[in-house]
Amino acid sequence: MRVSKSFIPTLRDDPAGAEAVSHRLMLRAGLIRQLAAGIYSMLPLGYRVLRKVEAIVREEMEAIGAQEFLLPALHPAELWKESGRWDSIGGEMFRLRDRKDTEMCLGMTHEEVFTAIARDEIRSYKQLPQTWYQIQTKFRDEARPKSGVLRSRQFTMKDSYSFDVDAAGLDKSFDAHAEAYKRIFSRCGIASVPVEASSGAMGGSESVEFMAVSDAGEDWIVQCDGCGYAANLEKAQSAAAVVEDQGDTAALEKFPTPGVRTIEDLVSFDGGATAERQIKTLVYVVDDEPVLLLLRGDDELNEVKAMDALGMQALRPAHPGEIRKLLGADPGSLGAVGVTNAKIYADAMLRGCNGMTTGANENDFHLRHVDVERDIAKIQWVDLRSTREGEACVACGKPLRVCKSIEVGHIFKLGLRYSEALGAKIQGADGKEVPLVMGSYGIGIERIMAAAIEAHHDENGIIWPQSIAPYKVVVAAVKMKDAKQAEAVEKIYQDCIDAGFDVMMDERDERPGVKFKDADLIGIPFRIVVGARALEKGNVEFFVRATGEASEIPLDQVISELKKRMI
Ligand SMILES: [Zn+2]
């Protein structure tokens, strides 16, 4: 590829509004451009990387016996109604009507469509197992698209689906995917951490996410260096310190707390309470019903844990008006003592606590000497709190680490969730009809690109892992107008093509600094530079982007040197 004839619109400066490193560098290196919020065009260089990632994914999927499909992105609503997800999925789904006013949607995932094919075509256990996959465009109307392709509204996904006759078969398909995923991420230069995760809107019994640790990520994961325990914060458990029994058996006492609105206010209030001796009362709305969620004052609610605990796919904080109507007070003075008009869910850390302080449901008043189990009616005990950095690992007691990460893959044991809803049954070995046992498995292709950049870059630009670099080699002359240099560059370029390398030749009549800056920004792994002085000795400069290593090597050894270093 000749740079002078290529479309690589690099930017010298950081574009405004792009915070994540990968977003900034993908724009600056001319890989992507934004069309609308959360919608990106892949430019030629970006699309080369995307196709390389896809090729690796394909190889690994084929290696576990998966067969490639290509399903429509446009789906009839009817099918999503059969699974129940037309109603349970909220604003994230792009919905539309065709000219006959039939409801349709743009696929955000393909459980329904693949299950319908299996239902209509697979008759017997003898045809199993089957693993089907596709690499296809998905649509998700994100509330807050951000960080470039990391959280976008249209993206490329490899999704696969396994169909087995029983749970043991599903375990095998699931494990095969987990191994394939580890290989895919490692081949793309991403150190991935498999973590226990919430199955959320997908349903099913068990799921594992593959996370790339990065500050650009929006997921928090909890890791133990002692035993290797790893979980999404949405799922993570810890052996957090329990507040010891205060032995406070005194009767409830209401006391004035003028101006106290927050946990911190009450900590510093004369006669108040430390955060761990307070009950935090949150009002949420689930299915139009208000619920109270109680946590210890020093704990934070994890909303996904709350959704899992309540078996719901959506909840929202109540509005101030709803709260006043329900409890007769404003946030800052809320509590669950005496409340009978809403369900009450309390975090397990509050179990057995006495001598607690909570809002009195009367503005500027609190209650003290609260014994949680004595004074609050009909508590349902659940896990609501977010695990914190430094808390002890449940398994080994070592302190846990909490870090940000990018979700690059997610695999689910769906079990019978979709086959039962859609009536996908087959004849089992004993002749009886049984529902198909399913798994589903996803990888975000653009997210791999972004995660690789997040992991491999410096102040000069991207440092592509060789496996997914748009080109592996760039050849340039210091002075293209010098006939000898131009001739040497052309020769090396041609030799690289003959050797089968992905090579670009920067034969622009630009200052060397400009050409080198662009090569660094784009992140080409190897750079060969032809300059007058070295060329007199029959040498060229050989530069390795990842290590910064620069050496002079004989012109006629360029190809053998590259071959040695190529992975
Ligand atoms: Zn541990």
Image (spheres, rainbow, N blue to C red):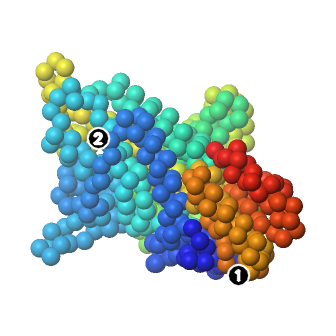
State the residue at coordinates (62%, 48%): 189
Is 457 positioned to the left or the right of 237 in the image? right
Q: As shown in the figure, which amino acid type bears the numbered disc 2? A: Arg
Would residue 392 be seen by someone viewing this image from the given angle? no
Q: Where in the figure is residue 432, as x and y percent of width and height? A: 14, 23
Residue type at numbered disc 1: Asp
Above or below, comparing residue 43 to residue 244 in the picture: below
Within 10 Å of disc 1 (Cα), the crowding (few <14, some 14-19, many 20+) is few
Dot in front, 1 or 2: 1
Of the 4 image quadrants, the one containing the C terminus is: top right
Q: Residue at x 74, y 80 (%)?
A: 481
Secondary structure type for disc 1: loop
Residue 417 disc label = 2
Q: Residue at x 68, y 61 (%)?
A: 492
**Relative height, residue 129 to residue 548 (above, below):** above
Looking at this view, is 331 or 158 the one in front? 158
User: Residue 9, position in %: x, y?
Assistant: 59, 78
Residue 510, quarter of the rendered image = bottom right
User: At which x and y percent is residue 196?
Assistant: 52, 39
- Of residues 177 and 525, which is closer to you in this image? 525
Q: Marks 1 and 2, Cα distance to the nearest angstrom?
A: 62 Å
Looking at the image, can residue 464 be seen?
A: yes
Q: Is residue 37 left or right of residue 232?
A: left
User: Given the current orientation, which residue lies at the most extreme top position?
Assistant: 430
Residue drawn 49% across and 64% down?
A: 47
Residue at label 1? 509
Please provide percent x and percent y for residue 516. 75, 70
Q: Quadrant of residue 95?
A: bottom left
